Image (cartoon, grey):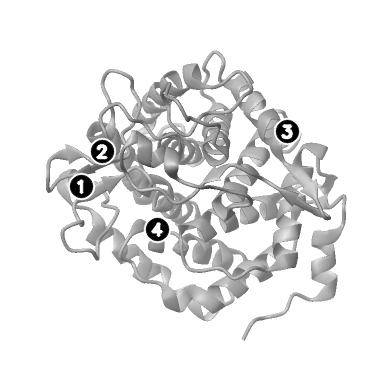
Amino acid sequence: MRKSIPAAVLSLALVPMMIGCGTGGGSRTSLPASLDNARTLTREWIERDPVMFWSWGEFVLLYGFWKLHEITGDAAVPVYVSNFLDENLYFYTPIASDFFSPATLVLLSCAETGAGDYCGLPDEFDDYFAAVKREEGAIVHLTGVPGQDRQVWVDSLFMDGAYLIERGRETGDPGWYAEAASQFVRFDRILSDPATGLLNHGFDFATGRMMNDPGVFWARGNAWYLASLGNLLTVLPPDHPDRAGLEALWRKRVESILPRQNEDGSWNTLLLEIAGNYAETSATALFAFGLATGLEAGLTDAGAREAVFQALDYLNGIIYESGGRHFLPDTSGGTSPGTAEYYLSIPRVINQNYGIGAYILAAIETARLRGEIE
């Protein structure tokens, strides 16, 4: 049965100017105005409480909520995440990284509250990684679909990578960081285009071919990689043996995507010049997140800092209010590898769950990069 959010708790999410508290025991301070949209989108989503499922879009949304909660101390978020787990965990079917990814929410929830019948499950979740590493040790996207279980999709680096990163943070076991680091190296070797430094969407070892058309580079896929890599670099110890190699990969990705940012701060859904291309919200947000986290981890790159600020200005500029609600438009729907025409035909969705989650992650890290929050 759904646990209701107590009125006193929910009211914390409804206060226009919430009071934040860091998870590291810092002093309570007012949150910057730059996070107003992030707080508003979170509040309005929780207030509406739409039906959700155990899948990757919900994970990205709730991961964003949780990272905002780590700053604000908003008590409504852990209750909301716990409700989600209670209602959906029985759908856990590790047949693809899409359907594994919400397992990360169990780690976050249990690390904070220690409550929930599911808090003994991470050991089971850990076994997933022994089953999904195939050719060259790379994580495959699909494990339960015969004939498609030798495909490497760039999406998996965010969906599975978040678990590796958060498991490493929780346990202090450097093996989790080492596994994450090894996947970035493998995915770069398998998916990277040598001419541009951009990443292909997917590779099928069964056919020996890329799954997207040649020269067609999907922005959100490249952004999944950069976002997850930046996230790892913020927690990887300075003396970690894999750090230098990962920093080189971050710079390689940055060099490939910065020239493709539009003048308004956005990135198009395809990273090439083609008729029908359009500015896509989730890729723009994830690029901003990956750039900001890399910079926070001590890396430098000419133009990266300004690119982050321009991206957030663009995203804040397209959020609009109607009928007392706020809306984030132009997030492309779920996408498989394909042709340029296919990518451009994917419908654009308003207030797509993973679009909101990606925006919140980007807003947080941009505020941190500006020194507005610790």
Q: Circles 2 and 1: CB distance less than 8 Å?
A: yes
Name the element at disc 1.
Answer: helix
* Label located before the other in sequence (2 or 1): 1
Q: Position of residue 188 (x, y in %)?
A: 29, 33
Q: Image check: 19 left or right of 102?
A: right
Q: Nearer the viewer, residue 259 or 329?
A: 329
Residue that carries the numbered disc 4 in the rendered image? 98
* Label located before the other in sequence (4 or 2): 4
Residue that carries the numbered disc 3 in the rendered image? 317
On residue 186, the disc is: 2
Q: Is residue 44 visible?
A: yes
Name the element at disc 4.
Answer: helix
Residue that carries the numbered disc 1 in the rendered image? 137
Which one is closest to the eye, mark 4 or mark 1? 4
* Label located before the other in sequence (4 or 1): 4
Report the Cα–Cα distance between label 4 and label 1: 19 Å
Mark 2 nearby-residue class (10 Å; few <14, some 14–19, many ≥20): some
